[in-house]
Image: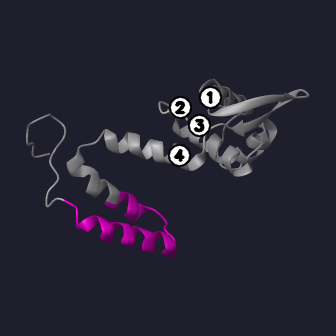
Amino acid sequence: MNSDLEITPAEWQVMRVVWSLRQTTSSQIIEILQQKVEWKPATIKTLLRRLVDKEALSATRQGRGFIYEPLVPEQQTMDQAADNLFNNICERHVGSTLEHVINNATLSKDDIASLQKLLASKVANSPDNVKCNCIPHMQMKC
């Protein structure tokens, strides 16, 4: 997978449809997205073209149209986006940012149990305090 793949919020909307359907046409994508957002078909086609250019989607000609398929796995792409976010924030703020995400996310009981198990396993090897990583070799109070 392209580790430099950057997907805009609008492109995420398109990718979510394609990931869900696994294989689809622009007409199907337009029909689904127009139920959620007020985008013109030309806008959606532009987003599709950008995603093909970024190698996130493949486009195979079929008659007058194209069949679109994802070239990047959904979970791996979401993980990469999360890693990109957390690699760009101060390490001292990771905990509070994760807390914010958890507070605002809808989680199943299985999700919560899995997170609790993961956190319990991390406690033994976790530091008492996380140091700022914004400026190398300096202890900042962010």
- SS for tag 3? helix
Q: Which residues, given as a range, are shown in magenta?
A: 99-126
| Of the pair 34 and 46, the residue shown nearer to us | 46
| Of the pair 98 and 130, the residue shown nearer to us | 130
- SS for tag 4? helix
Find disc 2 in the rendering and name its residue. 2
* Residue 96, position as x, y percentages in the image: 27, 57
- SS for tag 2? loop
Find disc 4 in the rendering and name its residue. 76
Image point (73%, 38%), residue name: 69
Q: Amino acid at mark 1?
A: Glu
| Of the pair 56 and 35, the residue shown nearer to us | 56
Residue 129 shown in magenta: no
Query: Image quarter for residue 119?
Result: bottom left
The residues bearing labels 2 and 3 have C-alpha atoms spaced at a distance of 16 Å
- In the rendered image, the vertical position of residue 58 relative to residue 92, given as above or below: above
Residue 11 numbered tag: 3
